[in-house]
């Protein structure tokens, strides 16, 4: 009986709680979108910003107290020097800017003039209010990297433990990137190519530095510029 309880506790921490955390994010996203439509972006921006902060703190506390800051096998590995990881993140951001331009050219030549719904939303948010601007540029990237990189990608990466390291990385990256892209623009949107490429860059950076702060820095810089 004691053994079963231990196994159940391990399973709850390893699989059930991460799924619940992801579902909380999904429910929050859908509810906030409906409230934005009902009350307007400008009027709802402060409440949304405040709710975002509360949820981030809640997730950080869960990861700290329940998982001891070792949510997955990546977090449990030896981390790169902080300063070195920041410098690498900036270099990766610069490289990714050129990749974005290449992808934009490919999308334009294949599909014509197509806009990213998410990019348009970020540009609009910057013009609405200071809370919405700060939320889109800084708060949302932190929240999304916790949810999609640390939780979703991390769990998928651990799920394929024992597989070939390249298959393990590519499978976890593609699945988490498609989920991220479908939430932002839809599954069959041409910009899915951008999300899969970005997912590989950010996930690779996370694995390389063993620090979630690295993909967060790149994500923030993307939304900022």
Image: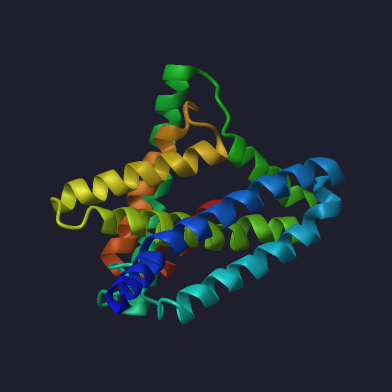
Q: Quadrant of the N terminus?
A: bottom left
**Residue 164 horizontal/vertical position (percent):** 13, 50
- Residue 19, given in percent of the width and then of the height, sits at 46, 56
State the colouring used for the structure image.
Answer: rainbow
Report the side of 84 relative to 66 (left or right).
left
Whole-percent x and y of residue 26?
Answer: 58, 49
- Is residue 220 visible in the rendered image? The answer is no
What's the residue at 54%, 63% (across, down)?
142
Extreme-front residue of the structure: 1
Choose top left, top right, bottom left or bottom right for residue 11. bottom left
Q: Image height check: is 170 above or below 211?
A: above
Above or below: residue 223 compared with residue 210? above
- Does residue 214 show up? yes
Residue 167 placement, left or right of 178: left
Residue 222: percent from left, percent from top? 51, 52
Q: Which residue occupies the foreground of this view, 56 or 140? A: 56
Q: Residue at x 43, y 19 (%)?
A: 109
The residue depicted at 31 percent of the width and 79 percent of the height is 2
Quarter of the figure with residue 53: bottom right
Which of the 4 image quarters holds residue 154? bottom left
Give the mark count.
Answer: 0
* Residue 7 in the figure: left or right of residue 32: left
Residue at 38% over, 40% down: 196
């Amino acid at each position: 009986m004691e053994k079963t309880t231990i196994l159940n506790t391990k399973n709850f921490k390893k699989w059930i709680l991460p799924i619940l955390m992801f579902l909380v994010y999904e429910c929050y996203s859908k509810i906030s979108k409906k409230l934005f439509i009902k009350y307007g972006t400008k009027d709802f921006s402060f409440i949304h910003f405040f709710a975002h902060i509360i949820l981030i703190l809640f997730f950080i506390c869960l990861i700290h107290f329940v998982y001891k800051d070792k949510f997955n096998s990546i977090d449990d590995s030896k981390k790169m020097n902080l300063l070195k990881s920041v410098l690498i993140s900036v270099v990766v951001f610069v490289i990714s800017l050129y990749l974005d331009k290449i992808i934009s050219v490919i999308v334009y030549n294949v599909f014509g003039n197509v806009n990213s719904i998410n990019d348009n939303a970020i540009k609009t948010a910057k013009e609405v209010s200071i809370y919405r601007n700060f939320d889109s540029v800084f708060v949302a990237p932190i929240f999304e990297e916790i949810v999609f990189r640390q939780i979703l990608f991390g769990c998928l990466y651990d799920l394929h433990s024992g597989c070939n390291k390249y298959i393990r990385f590519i499978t976890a990256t593609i699945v988490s990137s498609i989920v991220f892209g479908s939430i932002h623009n839809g599954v069959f949107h041409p910009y899915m190519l951008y999300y899969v490429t970005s997912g590989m860059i950010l996930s690779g950076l996370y694995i390389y530095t063993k620090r979630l702060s690295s993909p967060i820095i790149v994500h923030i810089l993307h939304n900022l510029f």
